[in-house]
Image: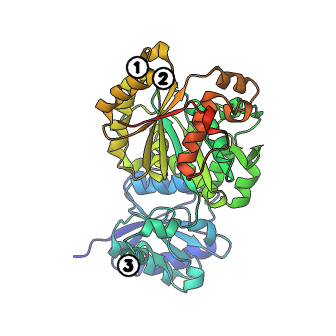
Amino acid sequence: MTSRHTVALLADPEDEGGIVQAVDARADLKVVRRCADLPEVRAAVRAGIADLVVLRAAEPDLDTLVIEELHLGGAGVLLLIDESTHTQARSLGADALAQKSNPERVVEALENYIRGGHIHIPNESMPPDPFTQDTCVTRDAEAELKDKAAAGHRTQTERGRGTILAVWGTSGAPGRSTFALGIAHALAETAPTILIDGDMRNPSLAHMAGIPLDSSGIAVLARAALRGVLDDRDLEAALVPYALRLSILTGLTTPHRWREVGPGALDAIVMAAARLCPWVVVDLAAVTLDEVADETRHIGDRDDTTAAILRRADEIMCVARADVLGISRLTHALTWLEELNVSAQLRIVMNRVASAATGSRPYSAIGTALQAIIPERSAYLVPEDTAVAKGLLKGRSVVAAFPRSPAAQALCDVAGSLNGTRAHVSRKRRRGRHVKH
């Protein structure tokens, strides 16, 4: 005997009757709840009353967080669209789309979804547009397209975008944000660069750069991303020009607002930035080192948000403080990162190198210590330099304020290794080191 799937329906009054009749005419489908609003839909799924949701895309409070909540409750989600909502709906992460005025197409989409099972498709790979395909669309159809181009899928879909550099590191204030500001400024010497404050624990780039934090640029864009309406114009309007070829997207005004920017929203913002600029530098928070769960991609905690960008990044700069405690914390951070199975190029940065912390031969001591942790891998060393703090007092990175200082020259060397060009300051005065072991 065929099991019957139960449907919770939230549709416009003029569409509801036709959809109910079409659904109930099928032996394997039954509308069990005609919902008056979105909370009633969510309650039906949480109570286990419905395993399918048919929901109007024009619902005011609908966003990716709601879709993900319904998925976590075990429900498949079909969005009812018209010409005014189909573009937005395609980015919300639903299982299927169907024109709201065509009940038979709605039923066909539901049955295609049931046959295909609960297959999750990432937001960057949405179903084709029903208004250009003259058909209902489910994840089944998208899965066929993905199977044909499984090899090299990521390269093909992301070709032409800028390089995403995640600046991450250990706990204990190793200087991630200071490094991110400096490396972004150095990269901007050769190509347009966007610096994003993605630190959900201690957002500080606006303060370092001397930018008045009247509103949070990242929070504004996150709201648009969750609604599926983020576009390049939104991003350009939120960016704050900081230097020649360098713009900054300010972070949260207070870390207590971290729930406003989930993993999916930050990922969408970073990808939008990568469509605009050759370089996107994202300053990320240290993590608790707890296990990151894949199923909480959109509604996870701050560690999940950091993990989402580390998975997305092309390059990762892991910053640790150059002392005994910093090296110990680096061990744990790298173990946590390994569990994420990231594909990005990992580069280690030992920051604030000084003889007071590591002895009279700091570079040799650090190289020996790192050999036991990351054998066969090199590390960049950035020296302790009072010019860094002096530059921040002026609201400028050390690269801009004191370009001939040892820290600035070390940062330019790192930038040069990333983009394959020589940095803009004279090499004969460089003091930064690149240690291999």
Marking on residue 172:
2
Picture quadrant where residue 394 is located: top right
Q: Which residue is mark 3?
A: 148
* Left-right relation of 420 to 72: right
Query: Can the viewer see residue 117 in this picture?
Result: yes
Q: Which residue is mark 1?
A: 325
Q: How many marks?
A: 3
Front-most of 222 and 96?
222
Farthest residue in the bottom direction?
134
Q: Residue at x 69, y 60 (%)?
A: 232
Residues tagged 2 and 3 counted as in contact (Cβ below 8 A) = no
Q: How far across and down, in percent of the image, does residue 268 sit? A: 57, 55
Residues tagged 3 and 1 counted as in contact (Cβ below 8 A) = no
At label 3, the amino acid type is Lys
Q: Which of pointers 2 and 3 lies earlier in the amino acid sequence?
A: 3
Q: Which of pointers 3 and 1 lies earlier in the amino acid sequence?
A: 3
Q: Residue at x 61, y 60 (%)?
A: 228
Q: How far across and down, in percent of the image, does residue 374 sit? A: 33, 36
Instruction: Kindly state the secondary structure of the residue where label 2 is placed.
Output: loop
Badge nearest the viewer, 3 or 1:
1
Residues tagged 1 and 2 counted as in contact (Cβ below 8 A) = yes
Q: Which of pointers 1 and 2 lies earlier in the amino acid sequence?
A: 2
| Residue 47 position (above or below residue 412) | below
Q: How far across and down, in percent of the image, does residue 272 sit? A: 62, 57
